[in-house]
Amino acid sequence: MPGLRVTAGYGDCMSPVAVNADSKPLHISNDEFEGDLTVRIKGFEAAPGETAPSEPESGYFERHTSVTWSIAVAGRVKRPINADDLRFGNSFDRPIRDHLPYGTAIALKAFRLIDPSLEQDLYADKPWAFSPLVATMPALRVVRSADDPPWSAEQPEEDASALFAEDDPDRGRLVGNAAARRRLFNAAAVRQSIDITPDMWFHADFCQGMIDFAHLRLTIPVANVSFDLTKYWDGQPVRFVAQSRDGTRELFRVEFVIADEAIVAEKIAAGHQVAGAATSSSVPAAATSTAGDEALQDEID
């Protein structure tokens, strides 16, 4: 597995993450958010020189065998924010349109099947792809409490009922049913009716099994599409961030960087800007022609 550097925090205040060290989450505190965060990567190999006490494996993967990586966060907002305004996803500082792989359009269509609330513009000068946090998280627990429950390395037990009033008919549908919660919050009108407030503590797990970190390969089974991420990486960090829709309020972010010397040297030789000598990573970039993508879309249709 190529070495990875994983950091988290907010804005320019980033710290190394002890990957797979489930009992040692990173604490994050800023004007918008207070809480703890951890990252899990199956078969993790740290970048050379990393000092964070990471582990190669986590017991989490024994309980969730289809998952290959996870970002888990628990905490609360410091100021109210509307559920439609709080988004989670990816952002990049530089264009990636000239690096997007063949099949990108069909991959995006497949992601929309998985997450209908996804919005994106990967062809922008500063590309992005975001979904409402309450709709995109595979696991989410919300508790109304003045006190923070203790940190838990376990995936949260699904229960978003605390987002609704006691007499709301939707409340009962949101206990132990992540699929129902995600379907419900796909509707903008429902999200807009809910405010996330400081008296709500939430525990979320963003987890997937589509990235093979041992070979840095992304596979989307529903679309039968697979990408070699190292081939299309342009040196930017792969960034996951929770922020307001307009980007002015950031709660937290996580950044992944390939730190394999051979891969970094190859990207630098190709003229890519690799932050910190290995501190950047963007995901795929494909041919600007969409003819092949349209043909693939026709097959899925």
Image (tube, grey):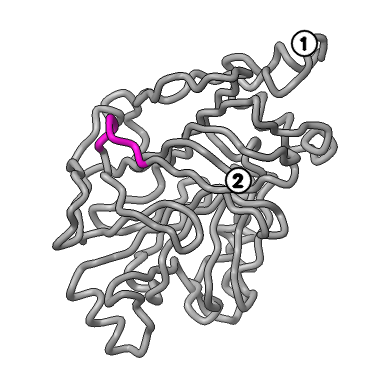
Q: Is residue 208 above or below residue 76?
A: below
Q: Is residue 242 left or right of residue 180?
A: left
Q: Considering depth in this image, is 226 or 100 the residue closer to the camera? A: 100
What residue is shown at x 39% (from left), y 56% (from top)? 218
Residue at image mark 2: 32
**Range drawn in magenta:** 21-26
Kind of residue at disc 2: Glu
- Magenta: predominant secondary structure element? loop
What residue is shown at x 44% (from left), y 52% (from top)? 9
Q: Is residue 72 above or below residue 257?
A: above
What residue is shown at x 74% (from left), y 29% (from top)? 184
Query: What kind of element bears circle 2?
Result: loop
Q: Give the crowd class for mark 2: few <14, some 14-19, many >=20 residues within 10 Å.
A: some
Can you tell which quarter of the image residue 265 is in? bottom left
What residue is shown at x 31% (from left), y 23% (from top)? 63
Q: Is residue 114 left or right of residue 80?
A: left
In this orientation, does residue 12 appear?
Answer: yes
Q: Considering depth in this image, is 103 or 46 the residue closer to the camera? A: 46
Q: Considering depth in this image, is 116 or 246 the residue closer to the camera? A: 246
Kind of residue at disc 1: Glu
Q: Position of residue 139 (x, y in %)?
A: 52, 29
Residue at image mark 1: 166
Q: Is residue 193 above or below residue 245?
A: above
